[in-house]
Structure formats: structure tokens, C-alpha cells
């Protein structure tokens, strides 16, 4: 009995579940009581004014101190997967280019049954779902039962490309998951199902169609062009081809994206130069170091595929096709820390790890080829956080966020409590979704270092008054809001007390504790 419990397969299965739990914990940190998982979209303030109407009626996290990224475009397309809404045009950087990767957007729309709140949140978690499916498929493909196979599995699942796709709600990991399913089908003698899967992958990312190289299993003396091979290829490319025609019809344009390619090795070598230069010019040493490690890792993968010539292996053909693509990737794909190339070349990472596992390659090569794992984990390190957010939640299907503004010093918290000190006259700003009008009822506690009277005004009307002291005093407010917005002014009648004897000490009049929305009634 004991030997069964501690058998090798059980031990490695336990390790696998442990890493799945680690991934789950890393991602669940991005959930927000009001915004849901929309912090993964990386929508910034510059895109706020041009976003579609639905993004104004549902709570979507807006970054104020960093740039936006592509996930915001695919999420907005999810509200109009037929591309027939004029509001998409100003919301996109290039509608015809973004629309090519339609499958995740359309899938989110269908799964959400067109519910506005669920569309964006389902889109945001599709990469997480794909991660779990890929984790299962790859565990089966690699037959994880030793250190070599476990490291190969980790090299794909925690790679910079995979986790960056999750973190930024992109389409790359979803495409990789479908490619892996196609490869798995072929290995299970279900080759006729694979072109449909590759076709679906192509609707996630057009470069996924490079996986058609797996059909080039040409035996000695066999013709390159056969009816069966032609049939498989046509099935794979037809959906994307028809969709591109539809995009041209609907938008009048068709962005080729040719700028993502350049002369062989030109951008790759430039990436090495800029990465090494960044050690002296960039302030974030860890970000630069992990980018260098990721670049070393993808280079090791490409060199290994280059040296290991085995055209009879479909995994080799998959890896070789993406190694060739790597040589031609343009500067825009390599730019950044670590850069989009890590995502674009995910099938190379997959093929490399399957091959090194089956060839029982030395552990040092497996580790060197998967150095991007460090960059991947760094990708999920920081969770977006608004230091002015005093409360967030959803009541009666209405999401509400309360932020401190003028007069408050910032939010502080322990495991049980959240509060903010005020200098004497402080402003609270309320925002609700959807943008309706009505009444918000909130509960809170007030505390002061000295006896004083605190009043609260809403639209110039007195809505609260109480004498407070060092003991926390509970209060309740009914606040009218209009078009999703409201404001409350808290005013103290006494002089603030210095926090310490230091000249720059905060002047503390009262603290607002544990504000909670009790009910929200919308008209």
C-alpha cells in the first residue's frame, strides 16, 4: 500500500497538480470584486475615450500608468464578432488586422449568450481555460513520469509566451492549445480530425497554419502532391481564407501585417544588441535579465531543431517551420521585455520540449532551452492596484467602486479592515455600472484622535452629522447617484492633529473605516 502511494507516477502526478495549483493561485490574484478579470486586458487611458459603448456600461479596468496592449481590441470585437458595428473602427488600431484572430472573440460572445458583463470576462479567462486543457494534453503527450518529462512540461506551461498570453488576454496560447490537440489527434491515429483543429488554430492566429507542415510526411518515392494531403491542407486553410474575404467585404480593407516580417536574422540580431545594451540603459535589471534568459532559451530551441534533422518526425517538421519563421520575424515582434516573439514562437517551444523528452536529451539542454520560464513567472508577478480604491463590489447586479479623492491621504488596510485618514475636508467619489441613476446605501465607521463633529454633504445637502472620538462610530448614508456617478464631501469642524512631531507629518482629522455598499437601487 505504501509503495503504491509513493510510486513514481503518483509522485509526479502530485507535482503536476502542485504546479497547476500554483498557476491557479497566480491568476486568481487578478480577480477584482467589480472589474472581474478585466485587469488582464491592459486597456490604458489613451484608449478610454474611443472604447465601444459596452465598455462604458460594464466595469473594465483602465491602466493609468502603463501602456495598453492588444487584448483590449480582441475583447471589444467580442461584442460585435460579425464586425458590423461602426463603433469598432475608432476603438481599434486596425480592425481588419485584429479581426483575423476572430475565434476567441466569437467564442466569448457565444459562451456568454451575448450578456455584456460576461462577454468581456469570459474573453479574459479563455487563455486560462486553454492553459488547463493544454496542461492535460501535454501531460499525455510527454507521458510525464521523470525529471526530463516534468521539466519539458514546465518549459511549455510556464514559458514566457504562454504566461504572457494569459496575462495580456491574447490569442497565442489558445492557438497553441488547439495545435497541440491536432498533434495529439494525429498521434492517436485520428489524422482526419487534425485539419479541423488546425483550421480553428488559424482563426486564433494566422501563423498557426504553419503547423500544416506536419502533413508533409512524404515517404521515399511518394509524390509531394496527393489527393489526401491536398484535402487535409484545404480543410485547414479554407476557414481563414473565407474569413479574410468576409473581413475585406465588411471593412473594405485587409491589413496584411507584412510589417511583422523582415530580412532573415536582421531583427533577431538587433534584439540581442538592444537586450545587452539595456543592462546599462534600463532601470529594471530583473526585467532585462529575464528577457536575456528568454532570448537565450528560444535561441537554444532553434539551434537544437536546426542540428537535429529528422524530417520524418512531425514534431521536427512543426519545430522547423517555426524556426524558419523566427529568422524572418520583424523588429516589432522582437521589441519589448521579453517581446511578442516568445508568444509567436510557442509552437517551437512545444515541438522542442516534445523532441528533447523523447530523445532523452541531457537535462542541461532542456533547462537552457526553457530559461524563458523565469520571464514567464515575472509576467504574473504584479497585479494592477488602485491605491485610492476604498471599496469595490457588486450588489443587486450593480458594480460599485468608491475612491478617495481630495483631502484623503491614501488607503491603508489589514486583513480585516480598510481605512483612510482625512486632513479635515475629504471627498469620496462613487462610480457604478451600468451607468444608471438611483440611490446607494452605504455603511461605514468614523474615528478621530480628538473629539470633533463630522458632517457629510451630497450635492450640497446635509446627509450625515455625528460627534466622533477615538472609538469607532458606525454610520449609514443614502446617496443619490446620476449616470453612474456620485460624490460625498466629509467635513470636520475641528483642527487636525499631527500624526508625529516631524515637520512633514500628516495632519489627521478623522479616519473613514470599512465602507461597504449595503444596497443599490437603480431607476
Image (cartoon, rainbow, N blue to C red):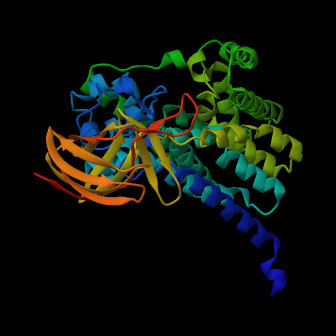
Instruction: Determine the residue located farthest toward the left in the rendered image.
Output: 523
Residue 144's quadrant in the figure? bottom right
- Decide which of 4, 28 is in the foreground and name it: 28
Place of residue 88 in the rendered image (x, y in percent of width and height, measured from the top left): 27, 29
Q: Is residue 68 left or right of residue 504?
A: left
Place of residue 341 in the rendered image (x, y in percent of width and height, measured from the top left): 62, 28
Q: Which residue is found at the position 33% from the left and 28% from the top?
A: 48
- Decide which of 228, 469 is in the foreground and name it: 469
| Quadrant occupied by the N terminus | bottom right
Residue 472's quadrant in the figure? bottom left
Classify 308 as above or below 463: above
Place of residue 474 in the rendered image (x, y in percent of width and height, measured from the top left): 32, 60
Classify 296 as above or below 368: above
Residue 386's quadrant in the figure? top left
Classify 128 as above or below 218: below
Q: Is residue 247 left or right of residue 292?
A: left
Q: Is residue 496 left or right of residue 326?
A: left
Is residue 363 visible to us here? yes
Q: Which residue is found at the position 74% from the left and 45% from the top?
A: 353
Classify 305 as above or below 134: above
Total numbered circles = 0
- Decide which of 155, 116 is in the foreground and name it: 116
Place of residue 285 in the rendered image (x, y in percent of width and height, measured from the top left): 73, 26
Q: Is residue 423 left or right of residue 56?
A: right
Q: Which residue is found at the position 27% from the left and 42% from the top?
A: 431
Is residue 217 visible to us here? no
- Decide which of 169, 111 is in the foreground and name it: 169
Amino acid at each position: 500500500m505504501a509503495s503504491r502511494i509513493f510510486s513514481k507516477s503518483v509522485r509526479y502526478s502530485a507535482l503536476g497538480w502542485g504546479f497547476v495549483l500554483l498557476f491557479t493561485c497566480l491568476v486568481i490574484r487578478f480577480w477584482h470584486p467589480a472589474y472581474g478579470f478585466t485587469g488582464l486586458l491592459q486597456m490604458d487611458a489613451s484608449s478610454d475615450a474611443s472604447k465601444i459603448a459596452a465598455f462604458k456600461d460594464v466595469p473594465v479596468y483602465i491602466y493609468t500608468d502603463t501602456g495598453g496592449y492588444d487584448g483590449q481590441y480582441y475583447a471589444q470585437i467580442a461584442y460585435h464578432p460579425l464586425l458590423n458595428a461602426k463603433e469598432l473602427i475608432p476603438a481599434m488600431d486596425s480592425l481588419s488586422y485584429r479581426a483575423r484572430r476572430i475565434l476567441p472573440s466569437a467564442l466569448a460572445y457565444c459562451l456568454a449568450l451575448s450578456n455584456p458583463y460576461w462577454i468581456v470576462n469570459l474573453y479574459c479567462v479563455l487563455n486560462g481555460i486553454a492553459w488547463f486543457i493544454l496542461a492535460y494534453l501535454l501531460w499525455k503527450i510527454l507521458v510525464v513520469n521523470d525529471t526530463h518529462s516534468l521539466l519539458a512540461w514546465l518549459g511549455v506551461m510556464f514559458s514566457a509566451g504562454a504566461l504572457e498570453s494569459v496575462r495580456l488576454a491574447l490569442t497565442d496560447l489558445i492557438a497553441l492549445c488547439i495545435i497541440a490537440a491536432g498533434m495529439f489527434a494525429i498521434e492517436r491515429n485520428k489524422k482526419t480530425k487534425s485539419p479541423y483543429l488546425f483550421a480553428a488554430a488559424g482563426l486564433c492566429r494566422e501563423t498557426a497554419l504553419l503547423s500544416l507542415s506536419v502533413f508533409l510526411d512524404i515517404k521515399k518515392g511518394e509524390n509531394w502532391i496527393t489527393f489526401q494531403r491536398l484535402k487535409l491542407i484545404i480543410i485547414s486553410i479554407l476557414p481563414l481564407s473565407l474569413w479574410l474575404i468576409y473581413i475585406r467585404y465588411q471593412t473594405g480593407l485587409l491589413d496584411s501585417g507584412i510589417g511583422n516580417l523582415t530580412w532573415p536574422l536582421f531583427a533577431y540580431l538587433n534584439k540581442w544588441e538592444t537586450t545587452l545594451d539595456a543592462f546599462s540603459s534600463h532601470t529594471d535589471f530583473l526585467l532585462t535579465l529575464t528577457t536575456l534568459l528568454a532570448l537565450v532559451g528560444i535561441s537554444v530551441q532553434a539551434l537544437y531543431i536546426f542540428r537535429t534533422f529528422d524530417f520524418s518526425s512531425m514534431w521536427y517538421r512543426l519545430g522547423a517551420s517555426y524556426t524558419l519563421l523566427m529568422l524572418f520575424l520583424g523588429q516589432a515582434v522582437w521589441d519589448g521585455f521579453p517581446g511578442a516573439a516568445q508568444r509567436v514562437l510557442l509552437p517551437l517551444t512545444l515541438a522542442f520540449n516534445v523532441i528533447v523528452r523523447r530523445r532523452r536529451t541531457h537535462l542541461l539542454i532542456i533547462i537552457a532551452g526553457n530559461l524563458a520560464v523565469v520571464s514567464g513567472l515575472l509576467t504574473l508577478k504584479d497585479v494592477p492596484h488602485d491605491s485610492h480604491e476604498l471599496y469595490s463590489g457588486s450588489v443587486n447586479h450593480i458594480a460599485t467602486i468608491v475612491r478617495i479623492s481630495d483631502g484623503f491621504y491614501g488607503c491603508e488596510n489589514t486583513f480585516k479592515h480598510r481605512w483612510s485618514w482625512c486632513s479635515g475636508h475629504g471627498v469620496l467619489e462613487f462610480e457604478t455600472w451600468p451607468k444608471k441613476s438611483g440611490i446607494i446605501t452605504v455603511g461605514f465607521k468614523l474615528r478621530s484622535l480628538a473629539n470633533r463633529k463630522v458632517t457629510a454633504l451630497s450635492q450640497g445637502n446635509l446627509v450625515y452629522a455625528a460627534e466622533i472620538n477615538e472609538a469607532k462610530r458606525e454610520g449609514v448614508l443614502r446617496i443619490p447617484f446620476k449616470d453612474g456617478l456620485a460624490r460625498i464631501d466629509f467635513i470636520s469642524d475641528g483642527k487636525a492633529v499631527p500624526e508625529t512631531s516631524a515637520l512633514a507629518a500628516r495632519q489627521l482629522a478623522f479616519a473613514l473605516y470599512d465602507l461597504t455598499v449595503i444596497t443599490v437601487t437603480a431607476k
